[in-house]
Image (tube, grey):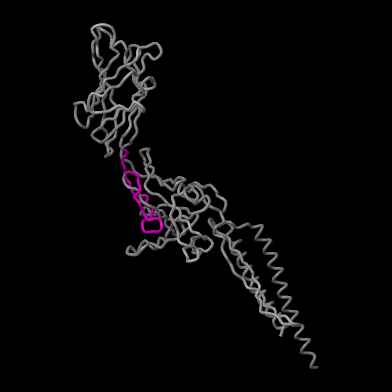
Amino acid sequence: MTISSSMNAGVSGLQVNASKLATIADNIANSKTYGYKRVDADFTAMTLGSNVGSYTAGGARVSTFRDVAANGSLIGTTNSMDIAVTGRGFLPVTPASALANTGAALPLRLTTTGSFYPDAQGVLTSDSGMVLLGWPADANGDFPALPRDSAAGLVPVNMTHNQFAANPTTEIGLGINLPATATQAGGTGDPFELSIEYFDNLGTTNSMTAVFTPQVPGAGQSNTWTMEIIDSATGAAPIAEFTVVFDNTTALGGSLLSVTPVFGGAYNAATGDMNVTFDRGPVDINIGTIGSNDRMTQLSSSFAPISLSKNGAPTGNVIGMEIDANGLVSANYDTGFSKVIFRVPLADVANPNALEAMSAQTYSITRDSGDFFLWDAGSGPTGETIGYAREESTTDIAGELTALIETQRAYSSNAKIIQTVDEMLQETTNIKR
């Protein structure tokens, strides 16, 4: 009977609008939840068929979906490991409770933002109990080839990875003026020495001594020096020797004219580096390029160190961590240097809206979402990783309140259908009277 189908259609209208109301309530309740993706309800008509002269109401059916692909606004924070993703891609995480089961693979969860702090073991964990996953770097800060379509290589990002680290010296800059008068005939030929400390692979301090000996001619001026490099780690004997000649022309007077290796090293004319092997390994000593006067010069009668520099630092403790746009996590040490210790990749799936919503604004892979692939942040289809930032909820309060009014009206209208059908059935019953 078509009047009964009207009653059923009204009931289904109440049910679908109740579901719509539930999504609105969830969205409003999570309007300040970081990383929350709003839920929406989609209505479809149910057609039961019709005959000539009559029509059977089918009502409506509801389906809900979460708009995971939508991006919320980013907000700045004060925590370096508050991470958000600009654009497409998900951070790989796992429940902290899963770490206790050392014999099983970690369950992979995906999220678009998180606030991570080191726990008692140094593992970066969020307040909601999610652990950040990444690929650990080797001692040189490099990453081996790892599977991109599997979570097998991902491990918890741990602040204590390389808790103590040394930063050995690999570059030394010598800005120094040698006295031009020392290479004139009649000079004493006495050497000039300059020492500078450096750090070895164990973080201990050694020193490099550069000995400059002028070549004194019988007449005139040679503008030529013998430069010896002594490494305190190997003793008093020189480890390298060079012959350095300076220009005396009007235009380029005092600048480098030539640098000739005698033993133990090489000179790179393009960079101005002397390539010398210390006890700790190769070190580049920059004295400037040919024709330049920005590093080593020969002017006047003064021996004067002008600018001395080196990289490296002694052994230090980790005092903090930061992540860059490419997902590289660097540990900051109390000795003033930083070192890459992890890479956090971004997972991408073909259909983000088909991911299964889990707790704490995380998602898991489903058959409909498609398989995931781990990209380096900022490459492929994925966005960049931003530290000191969180992604806000995608809920639009104004839009939700408008939808709330519309849903309330629709619910009332369906209730009115049921009331009207009830009155019509009552009239039908009254015919027997």
Q: Residue furthest front?
A: 52
Residue 162 belongs to the span the image colors magenta: yes
Q: Note whether 109 is above or below 413 in the view shown.
A: above
Give the side of residue 368 with respect to residue 105, left or right: right
The prevailing secondary structure element of the residues shown in magenta is loop
Magenta-tinted stretch: 140-167
| Picture residue at 79% right of the left edge, 93% below the top | 432
Q: Note whether 175 is above or below 100 in the view shown.
A: above
From where the camera sits, is residue 142 visible? yes
**On-image quarter of the C terminus:** bottom right
Q: Note whether 72 is above or below 105 in the view shown.
A: above
The image shows residue 115 at horizontal and vertical percentages of 47, 53
Q: Note whether 244 is above or below 357 in the view shown.
A: above
| Picture residue at 41% right of the left edge, 53% below the top | 124
The image shows residue 6 at horizontal and vertical percentages of 71, 80
From where the camera sits, is residue 155 visible? no
